[in-house]
Image (cartoon, helix red, strand yellow):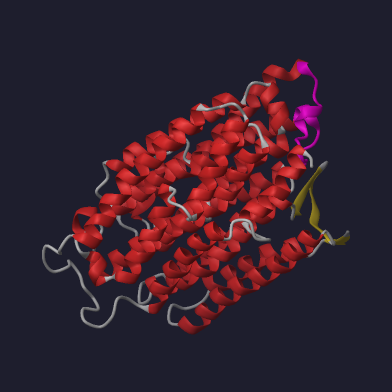
Amino acid sequence: MLPDPLMPLLVVLSSLLAGLVIFFLPEDRVRTRTLLNLGGALVKIVLVAFMFHGLYQGAHHYETRMPLLPGLDLVLRADAMAMLFVVLSAGLWLVTTVYAIGYLEGSPHRSRFFGFFSLCVTASVGVALAGNLITFLLFYEMLTLVTYPLIVHRETEAARRAGRAYLVYTIAGGALLLIAVTWLYTLTDTLEFTARGFVSALDSSHHGALVAIFVLLIAGLGVKAALIPLHGWLPQAMVAPAPVSALLHAVAVVKAGAFGILRVVYDVFGIEFSARLGLLLPLAVLAAATIIYGSVRALFQDDLKRRLAFSTVSQVSYIVLGAAVIGPVATIGSLAHLIHQGVMKITLFFCAGNLAEELGIHRISEMDGVGRRMPWTMAAFTIGAFGMIGVPPMAGFISKWYLGLGALEAGQGWVIAVLAASSLLNAAYFLPILHAAWFRSPSGAWPDDRLQGHGETAFALLAPPVITALLTLALGLLALVPFSPVNWAYLITTLEYGP
């Protein structure tokens, strides 16, 4: 394979440089800011596409390595698992950028918002491309810092409270992660991600220390992944603007935590070594408990974004559950859901943002008949909701199918019961929304109908959820075509489990 040390660095820089320039733009430089936002997103997609193709063909090896500390390098590496997250980040950044431009039109502090918005994506891509734990840690903590200004962007008291809660949770999680990484380095003298794990080379005398390190790593990553009882910051963060909520749930923070857990299980400890240490069953139980808890809490939320937030608490843990169930089929379900959940959830948050922006609707109890006023928005929401429930042939069905088959393959039938209960609960908190929107009559005038009689909403707000809704359907219908998340997950499982 031909080495290419520049490409991973350029992928990171494409959003970093755009963000740094945007910070210094006056608020009235709308066109320049838009060009930088869209230009950076498009450049990133082109670079990722070249890298993806080269890696798929087996013709290139993409790694940027720079000295950081004695014995430790800053490593950006495009391996198969990294590309799964990078493609998600790059693709959804573009549609979220279009949405955010429309959503924030005329709002104050747009240069500040889009500057941190670009840095947030930079950190997410850095997390994805990290080739060792120290690089992962640096970008993971950068993600904490650059996301905080987005959460508090509206500068209300509720936003400040949410920001404080977010910092308390994530800084505590980062401290645990730092302790674990430092302790692990003293035992192994390396932090390089390796297929089937680099920790497995240690002898049994380190059993107690390795169990403690694993617990610290999962706790540190579990904050952003919203595992219970570390999830409390996520529902509070829903006071942020809709593009931020979409970014938090689909691309950035929660996905970075889940991706980090995948790295720990597969590339730090290794799936087989983790099982020998007895670590995977407790992790699976924790993920299952989070799945059920998040779904139950979602049932009792009238605020639409809070219901979607608790849905995220539940749905992201499918990724963790699949990683904790030993076997290649469950791994495929876990990795595919990394993409599928992101596309489905971003659709739902885009739609929630449209309802709030156009009609002033924030609560489910206000949604009677809204499908007649905003049919395209609610059609997209319906597809996203069906995907979350697991209705075939949506993307969510594919994830649950592989997770269920993987559980049977591993002899863990109890996982089937968890998946079935979760799907029933998903239906219980999504179907009443759809019934109210499509089959009930409006009780009166909408709280704030900005375009009454002049269309559904702005094109920049409508196109992104329609596109991601269609993608939700396509990811299910075309699950086995080349380059699909399922197909790419097959490649990753080959590295983990052998041909």
Q: Is residue 434 magenta?
A: no
Depth check: give the residue in front, 462 or 450: 462
Residue 252 location in percent, x, y? 53, 54
Residue 59 lies, with reference to residue 293, above or below; the image says: below
Residue 141 location in percent, x, y? 58, 47
Q: Is residue 195 magenta?
A: yes
> With 83 as the anchor, is 281 left or right in this view?
left
Residue sitting at x 72%, y 29%:
272
Q: Which residues are magenta?
A: 186-204
Residue 266 lies, with reference to residue 307, above or below; the image says: above
Residue 221: in sight, yes or no?
no
> With 365 as the anchor, is 487 left or right in this view?
right
Magenta region, main secondary structure: loop
Residue 481 lies in quadrant: bottom right
Q: Residue furthest left?
A: 444
> With 69 as the anchor, is 432 left or right in this view?
left
Q: Residue furthest top?
A: 205
Residue sitting at x 72%, y 62%:
52
Residue 294 lies in quadrant: top left
Residue 6 lies in quadrant: bottom right
Residue 273 location in percent, x, y? 72, 27
Residue sitting at x 29%, y 53%:
304
> With 297 as the anchor, is 370 left or right in this view?
left
Residue 43 lies, with reference to residue 2, above or below; the image says: below
Residue 69 location in percent, x, y? 78, 45
Where, quadrant-wise, is the N terminus in this rendering?
bottom right
Residue 473 lies, with reference to residue 270, above or below; the image says: below
